[in-house]
Image (spheres, rainbow, N blue to C red):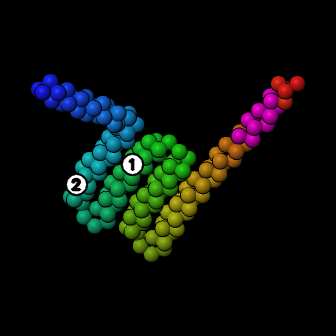
Amino acid sequence: MINAYAMVLLSAAAAGFAGSAISAPTEATVAYTMANQRAAVDYKVARAKCNSLAGNLRAVCVAEARSARIHVEANAKAQYESSLSARTDAREAIADADYDVDKARCASKTGNAENVCIKEAKAALVSATAETRADKKVIEARVDARDDKQTADYKVAIEQFDK
């Protein structure tokens, strides 16, 4: 009877170890998690440095800290997901973060200089977003062209071997 209990316990333990080995995180998952943790820590440190500042300098400092965090997190996610849409989303998030920093810097100016600064920041955002979308369309077109070429080559090869 004791041997039966021992066998059940050993079987359960073996199943538990096998399950944990199967569910072990991949290297990509670990790298993604580490990048997000590093970004969070760096953000907290940078944000703490901003507390000693006042006014617009503090707002710019906070925006820069947030932007740095978004840069790291977006690039890590794009690398982890390894897809065109993930990379495009990352580039757009980075452009938005940079725009927020530029707007914070513009707040220190007054009058027409502030308006010009905001228009320049908005133009940079629109430019980066448009460039990102254009790059995505170019890559998609190249993939489609490559697929069409491979299909045509395959049809030629099939025709050659049918003779």
CA separation in Å, label 1 and label 2:
19 Å
* 36 and 120: which is toward the camera: 36
Magenta-colored stretch includes residue 136: no
Magenta-colored stretch includes residue 150: yes
As displayed, is residue 131 above or below residue 157?
A: below
Q: Which residue is mark 2?
A: 48
Q: Residue at 33%, 42% (x, y): give it.
A: 33
Q: Which residue is mark 1?
A: 73
Res. 141 mark: none
As displayed, is residue 126 above or below residue 12?
A: below
Query: Which amino acid does the dot numbered 2 rest on?
Result: Ala
**Is the magenta region chiefly helix, strand or loop?**
helix
Image location of residue 127, percent across then percent down: 58, 58
As displayed, is residue 78 above or below residue 131?
A: above
> Dots 1 and 2: beta carbons under 8 Å?
no
State the SS at label 1. helix
Answer few, some or many: residues within 10 Å of disc 1's Cα (few below 14, many 20 plus, some between 14 and 19).
many
Residue stretch in magenta? 147-158
The image quadrant where one finds the N terminus is top left
Residue 15 in sight here: yes
- Quadrant of the rendered structure where residue 65 is? bottom left
Name the side, left or right, on which 150 lies relative to 25: right
As displayed, is residue 142 above or below residue 13?
A: below
Q: Residue at 77%, 32% (x, y): give it.
A: 154
Query: Which amino acid does the dot numbered 1 rest on?
Result: Glu
The image quadrant where one finds the C terminus is top right
Q: Mark 1 vs mark 2: give the one in front.
A: 1
Q: Earlier in the sequence, mark 1 or mark 2?
A: 2
Q: Residue at 50%, 63% (x, y): give it.
A: 121
Residue with the most extreme bottom position: 111
